[in-house]
Each structure stands twice: as C-alpha cells, then as structure tokens.
Image (spheres, rainbow, N blue to C red):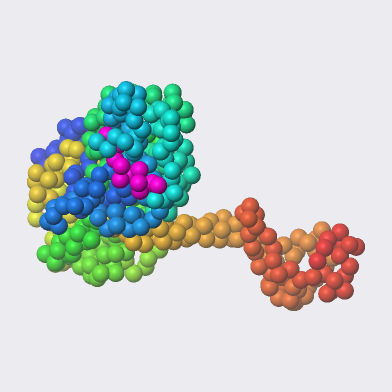
Amino acid sequence: MSDFSIGSVLDDDKRASLQNFSENLPTASRVIPDNSKTKREIVSKVAFLLGIDDRYFGIGQNENMNPQFYRSVYEDMKQDKEARIVRNLCRLRTRLQRNFKAIFTEMNSDIKNIDAIPDLVPQETLHALEDDGIQFVRARRRLDEYIVDVHNYLIPHVPNCQKFLPDWIKWPYIRNLFFINKGNTIEGNKEAARSYSEFRDLFPYQSFINWSPNESDGNILRDDAKFLPILYERNRDKFYDMSKVTEAGDAALTDTAEFFDKTERVIIAVDCENADPCKVIGIIKDMDAKGMLAKVAKILLVDDEHTSSQWRALRRNENLPLEYYLTDRVKDEKSAVDVALTIKFYREIAESRAAGQPIDAAIIISSDCDFWPLIELTPEIKFLVMLEYDNCSQAYYHRLQNNEVPFFYIDEFFMAGNIELKTEVVLQEVIREIEESHLSKLNLFSVINRALLKLDLRMNDAEVSQFLDKYVANMTIGFAKNGSAVLQNKPALNQLGVRGEELGVRG
C-alpha cells in the first residue's frame, strides 16, 4: 500500500500512549512463577545423596500422598552401592552435627560409643554402612574425629555418583555440596558446624551440606528450575537452559495449538534483539513439524546490526513465509528494532486487511515491555506472547497476566533436539565461514599460475586444465587436531618420476 502510514491505524492518543508507556515501568527483574510442571529429577537425586528423609520420597506413606521427590529415583538409586554409601554417610553426618552436644555428653559422661546411642545416632545407618563395607565404628574415637571420618569416607565415593547426573550439569558444583572447606580437619568441621548450628533451619531439610544459606532462597530443593540457577549463581556462573528443567514445553505447545485453532491468519513477529535464536528456531521448527504454520501469513524477523548471526539458520529455510528486516543505528547506543517491528507489524495488518485476507492473530516473541501498547491498542487482534525469564520485567509479566493475554516462557519450551539444534546452527555457521571467508578466496588456476611464475615455466590453457584435473582436483582439505588445514590425498612425487629431495619437498 503506497499510501500507508501509522496514522492510518493509530489515532493521536494511541500514538502518545505508545510513546510514553515504557517510562512508567520499573526496571527489569527476574520473574520465575511457581509452576507445578517444573521437573524434580535433579533435586530428587541430590536429595537422595544428601540423605534427606525417606518420607519426602513417599516411602512409608499412603500412595495418595504427594511426595516432594520422585519415589522412582529413590528406588533406582537405592540399588546402587556407591549411592547408598554416600546417602548413609550424609545422613550420619547430619545427625552427628545436629545432636552434637547431646552425643558428646553421652560419649564423655556415660562412656558410650555412637553405636550405643540409638535415640541420637540412627543405628540402621551404621548397619547399612557396615553391610556396604564401611566399618565406621571404632573404639576410643572422639565425636569430632568421627565427623572428620565421614568427610574422608566421602572423598572416594562421591565421584562414583556422577553417573546419576546428566552430562549437561556441571558436576563440580554438585560435588562441592558434599565437601566443606578443610573438612579433613577437626577445626574445619567446627567452623562449618557453627554456621550450621546458627542457620540450621535455612539448610535444605536441615541437612548438613557445604552451603552458605540465604533466607531469600527458601527451599533450594523445591524443584530443578529453582535449584540449578541458585547453585550456578553460588559458583559465579549462570544456568541458561531452563528447557531442560521444566515439563512445560508440551503444555506450551498444546496451548499454542489451541491458539491456532481459534485463528484464521497469524503473523509471528520476532524481536531478534530480545529473543534467543536457538530457542526461537526450535519453537518454529516444532510448529512447522506439527502443521501449525499453515495459518501463518508471515514470520517477521526484525534484527539489529549488532545482534547474533544465528538467525541465518532460520533465514535459510526457503519453505517459511519469512521476511527479515535488518535495522541500522543512527546512534550507536540506541537500537531501532522495537520501532521498526511496530511499524512493520501495523503495515502487515493494514495490507492484509486491504487485500481481503485480514490477520486476526499474532504471536509476539520478545521480552521487551515496549510492545505492550501494540497489544493494548490492537484489540481486534488475538495475541500470544513468548517471553524469557531473565529478560522479562515483573511489571510486564503482571500486565499480561492481569489483562488475560496468554503467554509462556520459551525457557520452559521442551526441545528434545536442543543440542542437535545448536550443533546444526554452529555447523552451518562454520561451513559458511569456511566457504565465504576462506575457500572463496582460493582459486586453483591462480595458484597454478603463481607457481609457474615463480618457477619461470610456461603452460598453455589446455596443459593447465589437464594438470588440474590429473594432479590437483583429487586433493582434499582436512583439519589437524589443532584446527590447522592440511592437504590430503596429495600425489606422491616419486610416482611422477621426480625425486622429492631434489625439489626440497617430500611426496
């Protein structure tokens, strides 16, 4: 439409609202809503190893109870000797630290060993350790020495439990939960015990672990989606892939399918500056595989010149109704993506309406709250918003929720092929880089001509072509372990009747 303008869609009041809305929102903060569909696979395994009580796994309770951790994990890990040893050592250490004063009194005043204090030290734990080959009880052993013994016994057995955790988790962060600083010394354990005694209620299920509790953390073993981000943060790292710790992906895809069922024509608008390329590509591929894209009039990608080249992986798909628009910057510090996306969105709405094929629904893939006016001021369009945890402000989250605008977090989107997708994206970029940046500059006719010039020799065009076909064309480029390019399938010079040492080369 040549006569299109934003003014044809928005009146002055709406334009003012669009311009001023973002000034009224607070700064972004991380929002993680309580979600019953988050997984508890990892926390169940960690809880087992830490010795958390059986009842939290639903052991010894009615089947109708809703245990905190997976009973199946308990039953599976209980069959493993190494896991049992670690669990029982941690159970014992927690009990020794929790009841330290009372046990100390019994051992010193009444001259009892820990195997004779059943109300303070769980005897079944000592027997289980003995059955697994750990002779823990010794004569004339002090209580603080027993606590050091637990640490020393854990050292060889904890690493053998890494097999229960998936490869994508950084195992050292889990391992460190079991080993306190200077745990092989009495003084090191005393220092840790002081912190545990003071903040015991803040430790997960009051279990003694290597942890600096923070009241704001709450129950860190509530579910995987809570535990792993906090664990990584304590190790000065960040856990990114929330899709691995939630079960919300299938539900999200179902909700998306229901959204499509209620529409005729849909536009998908992607703010490339505020969306993870891999996750968006995964979502669109899943939609495509399930036939949802049949109703999509256009997938609109609006990108900034400073953002990721990963979007090329989506742009290469010629079967998608894709439009890619790259914005440049007038000022280096100011992006124009949100304005460009809004304009192009309204242009698409107006043009489709004029063509008699109106768009009645839209999916906005962005965590930027600046797009709320676009939603609010277009009531004739049904919206679905896809967000990311770390980029979504609390105000935007509540605004969508309070106005009953459907949304979900793409962090929760289950992508079984997530690793394969990343591999595909990286491989495509590597191939492009090799072909465009290196191979495109390599021309074998030029190489042969430069060789002839250096050697002061002559070949006519036919001879050059024959030489190329016979000796050079079959060579391939391989890569050494250090990444260096290496010529392979080189013809042996001695087969040509030339002695290599005369040329200063080897065949």
Q: Is residue 276 above or below residue 427?
A: above
Name the dominant secondary structure of the magenta segment. Answer: helix
How many numbered markers are drawn? 0
Q: Indicate the position of residue 158 as horizontal and vertical percent values.
A: 43, 45
**Which quadrant of the view contains residue 299?**
bottom left
**Which quadrant of the view contains residue 315?**
bottom left
Q: Indicate the position of residue 167 as horizontal and vertical percent values.
A: 43, 53
Asked whether residue 416 appears in the rendered view, the answer is: yes
Q: Indicate the position of residue 198 as horizontal and vertical percent values.
A: 27, 24
Residue reaching furthest to the front:
110
Residue at the spot 74% in from the left edge and 73% down from the top edge: 471
Image quarter in which the C terminus is found: bottom right
Image quarter in which the N terminus is found: bottom left
Q: Which residues are magenta?
A: 120-130
Q: Indicate the position of residue 135 as horizontal and vertical percent values.
A: 43, 43
Magenta span contains residue 227:
no
In the foreground, 52 or 10? 52
Q: Is residue 184 above or below residue 374?
A: above
Magenta span contains residue 127:
yes
In the foreground, 357 or 162? 162
Horizontal arrangement in the rendering, residue 450 relative to residue 12 (left or right): right
Residue at the spot 21% in from the left edge and 48% down from the top edge: 55
Asked whether residue 326 appears in the rendered view, the answer is: no
Horizontal arrangement in the rendering, residue 351 relative to residue 98 (left or right): left
